[in-house]
Image (tube, rainbow, N blue to C red):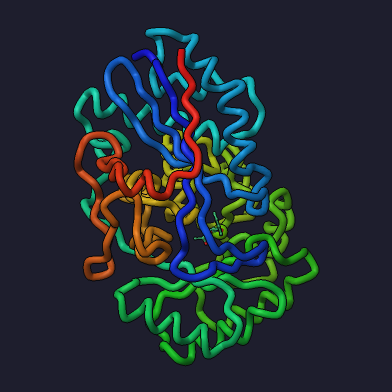
Amino acid sequence: MRLEHVELINVEVPLVSPFRTSFGIEYVHEVLLVHVITDQAEGWAECVAMERPAYSSEYGSGAAAVLREFFIPELMQLGDNLTAESIASTLHWAKGHRMSKAAIETAVLDAQLRATDQSLASYLGAVKDRVPAGVSVGIHDSIDALLTSVQGYLDEGYLRIKLKIEPGWDLEPVRVVRETFGADMLLQVDANTAYTRVDGPHLAQLDAFDLLLIEQPLDEEDIVGHALLAKSVQTPICLDESIVSANIAADAIEMGATTIINIKPGRVGGYLEGVRIHDVCAERNIPVWCGGMLELGIGRAANVALAALPNFTLPGDTSASSRYFAEDITEPFVLEDGYVRVPQGPGIGVTPIPETLARFTVNTERISR
Ligand code: NPQ
Ligand code: MG
């Protein structure tokens, strides 16, 4: 396949409500889309870098820069030799920038699969045609407001609730949600690195609430700290930010830092590396689930395909589009009895609706061979 043109498209889509985590609050979702035009087909991907480097060191305009200046020209120079499977090794010289690598790899993979009329789900090894949906619930201004939100998501049919926590918003909201909605509800928490190693005894108080897991309590680089914490907390520790490759996943498991892993393809450099993490975890009896980065339909479609692999045994943050957006740029993903359907069409199975995409687009840059 030959890469002829790449469009870097900046879109801004309003959120249905502000989303607050331990690292900040977002009101409007600003995303970089990657649209590749090859000699055989077109492909789409969504770069999951946030506007600001708050979740990880990557951020939207930086992602566009590294794609424009380095990755896209290098892949164009491959001429006819481009395949999705060769991208990671071609760009291996470049340190980091995994979200940018994931975006270009996924867009090329989408084009390649469309050219051969295969779905991403079947290519990755999916074994399900629908996946259970969890929902990530932001930090609220009051317990009452939180309870109203959680009640709404349960009414919609979400099968698992994840509460965002931080120091000052942890034991009490978790206790009240557990007591209000009962022992049967699947409940977990995500700290997005808001705690430190001395917080072991504090976080151990969450053990009373029968949580599925505590996600990423400590700094992304503190894998040893998570191994230490796991000794003082009964609730399983699940790493998100720390797991940036299959090798790191294997090491973190070996050290006892994580007994469940959140896989986000963007964070680890793409869906192919995501599958490798899935396999590393399956071999070690470590369950995985698919994380989310507030994806639009383009990114959501690909995540749902990945979440259909066999070792994704916990509900993911694979919510319906309406969790974040009143209007998506693709046909929206909807909840059906708490599940989201796995796209079956070629490639990621969805494309942006041109008029809708145009309305949310704030800039388009075209890079040609
Ligand atoms: C997580 N996601 O699991 C992330 C964090 C997160 C669904 O909880 C813009 C872009 C805002 C990406 C806010 C969920 C974001 C973002 C939070 C990712 O840690
Ligand atoms: Mg997380």
**In the image: residue 120, left or right of residue 161:** left
- Measured as percent of width and height from the top left, residue 231 is found at 68, 66
**In the image: residue 144, left or right of residue 315:** right
Judged from this view, the residue extending furthest toward the right is 198
User: Split into 4 quadrants, where in the image is the N terminus?
Assistant: top left
- Measured as percent of width and height from the top left, residue 226 is found at 68, 58
Residue 346: name its quadrant. Answer: top left
Q: Is residue 6 visible?
A: yes
Q: Is residue 315 visible?
A: no
- Compared with 171, 107 (above or below) is above
**In the image: residue 24, left or right of residue 147:** right
Image point 47% across, 34% down: which residue? 364
- Compared with 114, 194 (above or below) is below
Image point 54% across, 67% down: which residue? 19
Image point 55% across, 64% down: which residue? 27
Residue 257: name its quadrant. Answer: bottom right
Nearer to me, 336 or 197: 336
- Compared with 368, 288 (above or below) is below
- Measured as percent of width and height from the top left, residue 131 is found at 29, 57
Image point 44% across, 29% down: which residue? 7
